[in-house]
Image: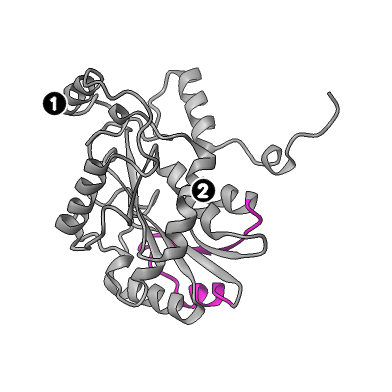
């Protein structure tokens, strides 16, 4: 076969997760390159998942997730973050945060759109943006305090900015963005009529500083989506969910994007 494969995919480097995991196996080393938990997680959660396999619901779930799970997610959003969301129209359950990221990017980015990314960053953001024809605008935080470089961030925004990806608490630095930094980002979003994809999978793993969501900022709450996950708080790499803003355009496009990525898992795989 001589015809070329997809060049965008072929030109992507192997992820650092793959490289580090291979080296760890080769040298029988502790793998610090990927978030493997060192326990199997709470046994009561494991038992609940095992019991769910016997409840007779092992076929496809609704595309947006089980209603009872979406209701529980909405309750958690209100309880932990004081952010009210509608379980029916603003919550989607996915099979992983990376899938949710990809669907969010697919719903927003068209070729030529600029996307602001803050480095150091999770290594999924950049290749997906590029595969969709987006143009990444990179802004780098520097040690030791990882302060937001406001002038650099301001310069990264422009008339073609479609979105910013905000990861807080931040992987891999552990930085937690404060209220002043979030307000600055929200103001840039307002000025440039742009969206935010908020990767908040570490929201419960904070020490000495509260987790604040960009969705607390009134001026940008309608243009932000939040990716949340229980797998980081409990060492069980299981279900994730997305909280969508109350915008008809997002709500129309999201099921179309997720439908091209996966078929809904059986309820036993995304049970509350």
**Number of other residues with Cα within 10 Å of mark 1, as a class: few under 14, some 14 to 19, many 20 or more:** few
Residue 165 can be seen in this image: no
Residue 244 horizontal/vertical position (percent): 36, 58
Task: Say if 233 sits above or below 115 in the image.
Answer: above
Describe residue 217's horizontal placement relative to residue 265 as left or right: left
The image's colouring method is: one colour
Specify start and end residues of the magenta stretch as a single range.
132-158
Number of marks drawn: 2
Q: Residue 257's mark?
A: 2
Residue drawn at (18%, 58%), measured in percent from left and top?
A: 78
Say which quarter of the image contains residue 7. top right
The quadrant of the rendering that contains the N terminus is top right
The quadrant of the rendering that contains the C terminus is top left
Residue drawn at (34%, 69%), measured in percent from left and top?
A: 221
Q: CA distance from mark 1 to mark 2?
A: 34 Å
Residue 220 horizontal/vertical position (percent): 37, 73
Residue 134 magenta-drawn? yes
Residue 60 magenta-drawn? no
Judging depth in this view, the residue of 72 and 180 nearest the camera is 72
- Disc 1 marks which residue? 44
Task: Determine the secondary structure under disc 1.
Answer: helix
Task: Say if 160 sits above or below 208 in the image.
Answer: below
Residue 34 horizontal/vertical position (percent): 41, 34
Mark 1 and mark 2 lie on one chain; the one further toward the N terminus is 1
Residue 265 can be seen in this image: yes
Residue drawn at (32%, 48%), measured in percent from left and top?
A: 201
Task: Say if 8 sits above or below 149 in the image.
Answer: above
Residue drawn at (22%, 20%), measured in percent from left and top?
A: 50
């Amino acid at each position: 076969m001589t015809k070329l494969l997809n060049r965008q995919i072929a030109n992507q480097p192997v992820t650092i997760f793959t490289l580090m995991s291979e080296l760890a196996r080769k040298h029988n080393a502790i793998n610090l390159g990927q978030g493997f938990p060192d326990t199997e997680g709470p046994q009561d959660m494991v038992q609940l998942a095992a019991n769910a396999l016997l409840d007779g619901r092992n076929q496809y779930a609704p595309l947006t997730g089980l209603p009872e799970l979406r209701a529980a997610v909405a309750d958690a959003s209100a309880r932990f973050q004081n952010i009210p969301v509608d379980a029916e129209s603003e919550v989607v359950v996915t099979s992983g945060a990376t899938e949710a990221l990809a669907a969010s990017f697919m719903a927003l980015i068209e070729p030529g759109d600029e996307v602001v990314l803050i480095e150091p960053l999770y290594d999924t953001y950049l290749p997906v943006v590029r595969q969709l024809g987006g143009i990444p605008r990179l802004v780098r935080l520097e040690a030791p305090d990882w302060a937001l470089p406001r002038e650099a961030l301001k310069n990264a925004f422009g008339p073609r900015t479609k979105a910013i990806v905000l990861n807080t608490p931040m992987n891999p630095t552990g930085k937690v963005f404060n209220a002043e930094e979030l307000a600055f980002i929200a103001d840039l979003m307002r000025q440039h009529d742009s969206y935010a994809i908020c990767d908040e999978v570490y929201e419960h793993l904070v020490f000495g500083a509260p987790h604040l969501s960009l969705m607390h900022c009134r001026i940008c709450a309608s243009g932000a989506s939040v990716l949340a996950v229980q797998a980081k708080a409990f060492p069980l790499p299981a279900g994730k969910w997305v909280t969508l803003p109350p915008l008809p355009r997002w709500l129309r496009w999201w099921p179309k994007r997720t439908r091209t990525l996966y078929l809904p898992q059986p309820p036993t795989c995304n049970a509350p």
